[in-house]
Image: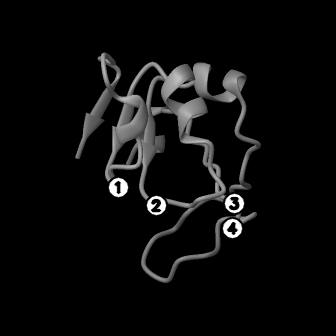
Amino acid sequence: LLREQNVTVAYHDPHIPHLPSMRHYPLPPLASQPLTAELLQAHGATLIVTDHTAVDYRLVVDNSPLVVDTRNVTQPWRTGRTNVVLA
């Protein structure tokens, strides 16, 4: 739905290098991007949908304009932040 609205979509997952085909959803081919400050700053929002210990969530909080955290993994770095919301 986001891509239909011309939104640039990217993802980072250290365990899934390429987005697999889905039976019910025609997804375009996507590859996991390196998690860098530049990648985070280039996007309007970051959605956290899993809580991998290999992900630097402080980097995410420090560099994303908006973080939507569905796993409560940003708790150690949320104090005083207005860019993090829990979902």
Q: Which mark is residue 3?
A: none
Please report the residue visible at 41 percent of the width from the left and 49 percent of the height from the top.
73
Could you classify mark 4 by the number of other residues whose Cα lies within 10 Å: few (under 14), some (14-19), or many (20 or more)? few
Element class at badge 3: loop
Q: Which mark is residue 50?
A: 2
Among the two numbered marks 1 and 3 on one chain, the one whose residue lies closer to the N terminus = 3
Tag 1: amino acid: Arg
Q: Which residue is mark 4?
A: 16
Asked if the residues shown at circle 4 and circle 3 are in contact, with their CB atoms under 8 angstroms apart, the answer is no
Q: Nearer the viewer, residue 59 or 5?
A: 59
Asked if the residues shown at circle 1 and circle 2 are in contact, with their CB atoms under 8 angstroms apart, the answer is yes
Q: Nearer the viewer, residue 24 or 69?
A: 69
Among the two numbered marks 2 and 4 on one chain, the one whose residue lies closer to the N terminus = 4
Q: Position of residue 19 (x, y in %)?
A: 65, 65
Q: Marks 1/2: CA distance?
A: 6 Å
Asked if the residues shown at circle 1 and circle 4 are in contact, with their CB atoms under 8 angstroms apart, the answer is no
Q: Which residue is mark 3?
A: 29
Please report the residue visible at 45 percent of the width from the left and 19 percent of the height from the top.
65
Q: Position of residue 71 (x, y in %)?
A: 35, 55
Question: Within the image, what quadrant is residue 54 found in?
Answer: bottom right
Q: Which residue is mark 1?
A: 71
| Front of the two marks 1 and 3 | 1
Q: Nearer the viewer, residue 9 or 28?
A: 9
